[in-house]
Structures are given as C-alpha cells and as structure tokens.
Image (cartoon, rainbow, N blue to C red):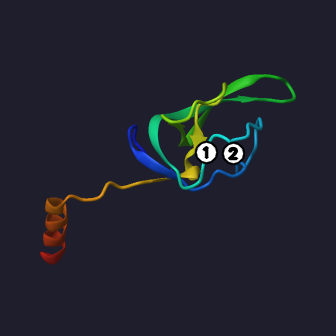
Amino acid sequence: MFDIGDKVVCVDAGPKKGRIGPIVPVHHLLREGRVYTVADLSYSTNQRNRLTGETTLVFKTTPLVALAEVQLPPPMKGFESYRFRKIEPPMSPPEEVEQVRELTEV
C-alpha cells in the first residue's frame, strides 16, 4: 500500500469513519487535495476502554499513516490510510518505452 517516503494526496479530511474512539478533530490538520510525504507507518494503537479505563494494545490490518508535514497531537500516531491515495511518480521516457515494448511483445 504505502511505504515511508511515498507521496500521497489527501482524499478524505472529514470526520472519522467506522468505530469512533476518542474524538480528535483533524479538519485543521489535513486538507483534501494536498500532497503529503509518508513519514511512518504504524500497525498498532492503544485503545482505551471507557468503562474500565483499561488501555490495551490493538493491532490493525491497515496502517496508521504519519506525515512529515503534520505535527500530531498526542496520543495520535497517524491517520487512517483510507484518507490517502498514493501518487505514482511519472515514468521517465525509457521506462515508458520499455512498458510499451512489454505490452506489444505479448
């Protein structure tokens, strides 16, 4: 999906989807259409039980994405990956020629 150093564009800066834990507004941190750089990926997060106050470590199937351009307020580790789409770097002319050659040789 994403790697550290990838350029991504924000496609969703709205309220969090799905099960909502502690509410941390992100509307002032993200802008739809803006390009960011992936600084870190985290597949775990702390989840607090509101009834007992107990905190447990939870592993995720999709990463939380930390961005080089955004200072996160604690305890945030990153943003949900559905908020971003990877920007593929444009191909250089030799790569384009090679790709066309591969497609025509089939």
Relative image position of residue 100 (x, y in whole percent)? 17, 71
Residue name at image x 85 percent, y 24 percent? 52
Mark 1 in CB contact with mark 2 (< 8 angstroms): yes
- Residue located farthest toward the right when viewing the structure as drawn: 51
Position of residue 29 relative to residue 18, above or below, is above
Label 1 is placed on what type of residue?
Leu
The quarter holding residue 51 reads top right
Residue 43: assigned label: none
Position of residue 104 relative to residue 69, above or below, is below
Tell how many labels.
2
| Residue hosting label 2 | 27
Element under label 1? loop
Relative image position of residue 106 (x, y in whole percent)? 16, 76
Report, in whole angstroms, how far the alpha carbon at label 1 lies from the one at label 2: 6 Å
Residue name at image x 15 percent, y 69 percent? 102
| Residue hosting label 1 | 30
Residue name at image x 14 percent, y 64 percent? 98
The residue lying toward the viewer, choosing from 30 and 15, is 30
Relative image position of residue 30 (x, y in whole percent)? 61, 45
